């Protein structure tokens, strides 16, 4: 598997995409996923930033643009397309693919911020996927808040779904 021929990426971006795909491949093996499921994760990895360096004008446009292009090129898997479409913001409607891509995009080893902490989180994914997903979402949303940016409704709904799980923390009112 590799980048689609319509991709527009810098060499640095391609290297990031390759690390995301490699991490997803490692997790799929460690989690004993089927070949079919692993291939879904890898397709999402190769597609997610395929238009990240295209002149789209809006940084948030590259996920939806890549999903639409992939659909036109024949990708029919709704989970893969939604993983790509919402990978920067999160989605409450994701299946496994969207959640795994969201994790790998943040935890791949090439990013500069807190490499040791992120490596430890990445190692926990096979055994404690849901707990790590909440921690990664918390860090990503925290960064959006501290940057003074708007939280999109998808992101809020994604977070609420994560903490609403039975093993999630309960907020008690006084
Ligand atoms: Fe990415």
Image (cartoon, helix red, strand yellow):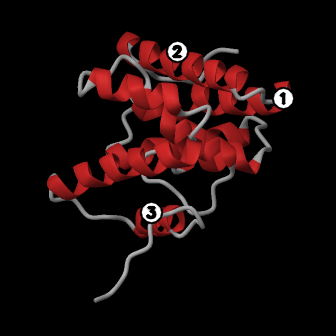
Of 131 and 149, which appears nearest the observer? 131
* Image quadrant where residue 97 sits: top right
Q: Is residue 12 above or below residue 87?
A: above
Q: How many marks?
A: 3
The residue labelled by disc 2 is: 18
The residue labelled by disc 3 is: 159
The answer for how far apart the CA atoms under marks 1 and 3 are is: 28 Å
Classify residue 40 as left or right of residue 159: right
At 58% across and 21% down in the image, what residue appears?
21
Q: Is residue 57 above or below residue 15?
A: below
At 43% across and 19% down in the image, what residue appears?
16
The answer for how far apart the CA atoms under marks 2 and 1 are is: 21 Å
Q: In the rendering, which numbered label is found on residue 34?
A: 1
Residue 58 place in picture, x, y as percent: 33, 47
Residue 131 place in picture, x, y as percent: 50, 48
The answer for how far apart the CA atoms under marks 3 and 2 are is: 27 Å
- Precedes in sequence: disc 2 or disc 1: 2
Q: Contact, CB < 8 Å: mark 2 with mark 1?
A: no
Q: Residues within 10 Å of mark 3 (few under 14, many from 20)?
A: some
Q: In the rendering, which numbered label is found on residue 46?
A: none
Quadrant in the picture for the N terminus: top right
Q: Is residue 51 visible?
A: no
- Precedes in sequence: disc 1 or disc 3: 1
């Amino acid at each position: 598997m590799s980048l689609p021929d319509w991709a527009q990426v810098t060499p640095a971006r391609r290297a990031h995409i390759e690390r995301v795909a490699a991490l997803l491949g490692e997790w799929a093996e460690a989690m004993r996923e089927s070949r079919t499921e692993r291939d879904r994760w890898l397709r999402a990895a190769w597609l997610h930033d395929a238009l990240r360096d295209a002149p789209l004008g809006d940084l948030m446009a590259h996920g939806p643009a890549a999903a639409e292009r992939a659909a036109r090129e024949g990708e029919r898997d709704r989970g893969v397309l939604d993983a790509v479409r919402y990978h920067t913001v999160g989605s409450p409607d994701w299946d496994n693919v969207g959640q795994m891509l969201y994790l790998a995009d943040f935890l791949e080893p090439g990013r500069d911020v807190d490499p040791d902490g992120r490596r430890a989180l990445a190692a926990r994914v096979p055994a404690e996927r849901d707990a790590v997903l909440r921690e990664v979402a918390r860090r990503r949303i925290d960064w959006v808040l501290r940057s003074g940016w708007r939280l999109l409704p998808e992101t809020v709904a994604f977070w609420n779904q994560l903490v609403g799980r039975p093993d999630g923390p309960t907020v008690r009112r006084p």
